[in-house]
Amino acid sequence: MNQPQAVQRADASSNTDLPQLYRMMRRIRTFEERVGELFVRGQSAGSMLHLSIGEESAAAGVCAAMREGDTFTTHHRGHGIFLARGADPNRMMAEIGGKEAGYCHGKGGSMHIADMGLGHLGANAIVGGGIPAVVGAGLAARHKKSGAISAAFFGDGATGQGILYESMNMAALWSLPCLFVCINNQYGMGTRIDQATANPRLHERAQAFGLTAETVDGLDVEAVAEAGRRLVDGVRAGKPAFLVIDCYRFYGHARKDKSPYRDPVEEEVGRAKDPVAFARAALIDRKLLAETALDTMDAEVAAEMDATIDFTVAQHEPPLSSMFRDVYAPEEPEPEPVRTRIDRILARA
Amino acid sequence: MALQELTYRDALRKALADAMTENPDVVIIGEEVGRYGGAYAVTKDLIKEFGPERVIDTPISEPAIVGAAVGAALAGLRPVAELMYVDFIGMTMDQLANQAAKIRYMFGGQIGVPMVLRTQGGTGRSAGAQHSQSLEAYVMHTPGLRLAMPATVADAYHLLRQALTKPDPVVFIEHKALYTLKETVDLDAPVPEWGKVAVRRQGRDLVIVTYSRQVHYAMEAAKQLAAQGIEATVIDLRTLNPLDFDTIRTEVEKTGRAMVVSEGVMTAGVAAELSARISEECFDFLEDPVIRVAGEDIPISVSTVLETGSVPGPQLIFETAMKLMAGRVAA
């Protein structure tokens, strides 16, 4: 059982620690690029890989305000969030490669990655599917007086799902420590937000349910981090909140999608809103880090993420016999394999 | 040894109260479970005993009720979510089938979802097409979900208590026509094992495999059959997942004849699955085809005549057994 935490452990400077935020965003971007490479090399398990390039500030900024013991769920585009909550990129990449050494032993993959130790209650391949879990986790936090918050990360596409509104209503009604984070990358698959809703000012919906809500420009990771800190403090005090981070999905919906449905001019403008480049320029402008120091940092990150590919390629697939494991608890009998069953029946005849 | 007279409803309520007393992490979450006391009064006054933080009245939001229970279970509680009617399960199927049922597997065994979804189904109250269905096949068709359907007062108590100790999500479907069923029970008597069928009656001629309210109908039919010199074994499944097929096989092999009775519709239903299994696994021992006695493949009507006529009852079970046995045993 989680013990109540009397003192907030996150370092007070984290929201304004631009070098750290930059480093995390760079790690996320480079990891995502390596995911793309894993696919090109034929080492990913499938092509259902949804990259968060262009959205790094949401993960880095909001997660900087969270602390140990907090729980969260993510959507199908959640690699960055998990990294920002402390995931081991090797085990992540191995999971994306469907390998035994991955976080879920190759059964989950990119869209169903989870780690209870880091409070990751699960990525989700159902749009909006992970949202109500944070209401339950919020109830548990209140019941156990753990002081934890629970955050649901999802995209603008999930604002079309009724479960979001049911969940926000419950969180507000019961004053639960829940944070709803809407990463508005402008597209639900191939449908732009203004083609999916008459009112794209998404935070207004949360306000209608009585949540504290705001929209922040994802170009500026410091602004995201400050908004995150502000809202998380309220959430921890039982005031659920909703944060929209405006950004742009640089590439297609999934690895194979070249987004032919998007206007090239729009893409150019969208990709110019690059939170990683923006933070890098700010670090140099404000003389927080020299360009050479940033180059060194980028090289370290590249080496770290290159290693995830080598690690993954070297790992083995899960044994076929693990297929029947973990349908039920380990103390329960495993389901009878179809072949065993057929042989047993025909042996009698 | 304390014999007491309890209704099915009392037994369920007592199971919840006892579990909540024993384990402070047990919470109830659902529509009208608190102040109203439950649509069928199962949770009556539990809110007074355990407070609104443990008996949580929700908005009418079935998907989020089940979803919140999933999250609460992941975060260390032992939630009992209540779905007022099993007919609403379609609303919740993403949270139930895509989340609760698959989380342990998808996450490589890191964690299970120890929650109970209590609901009720079946005919008997002229409640119409959207409040009278028997949808257990949806649940049985989803690996990862356990499924319990008590027929008796003692099972209402014990299966619910046991469900609240299980490491995996349990869907617990009560029968709306059984809430007032009254039986004298000794809850201190040895507790029947979870996952095992109960042989309610032993006979030499045929086996009737059934569950929930149809157990009572099968027992009535068996009594009528006995008057005709036909002795039926009646098996009450109690839990449909896990399924105690070993006992079913043993019993069917003794008689060589089997009927499966279910209130759910015939096609692709629980009776279809059981009948297929018996046919496959007991083939060498069968004297006759395995007969399914199930609900008609139609929606349920409000009209009592149409409602009653669309699902099995004692008379249909009796007549079917008589036809199955025709000319095969001396009366």
Image (tube, rainbow, N blue to C red):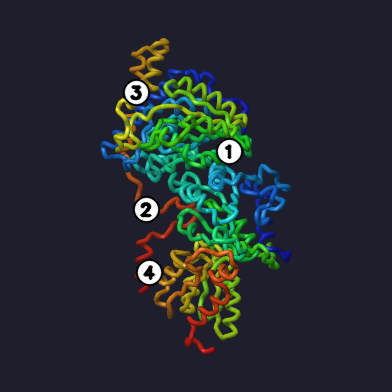
Give residue A345's mark.
4
Q: Residue at x 55, y 64 (%)?
A: B301
Which one is closest to the eye, mark 4 or mark 2?
Answer: 4
Q: Is residue B28 left or right of residue A152?
A: right
Out of B261 and A339, give the one closest to the viewer.
B261
Q: Residue furthest left?
A: A41
Residue A158 image point, x, y percent: 46, 38
Distance between the Cα atoms at labels 4 and 3? Answer: 65 Å
Element carrying mark 4: helix
Q: Which residue is mark 3?
A: A269
Dot label at residue A321: 2
What chain does badge 4 belong to?
Answer: A
Give the chain of mark 1: A
Q: Residue at x 44, y 56 (%)?
A: A334
Name the kind of residue labelled 4 in the image: Ile
Q: What's the residue type where badge 2 is placed?
A: Ser
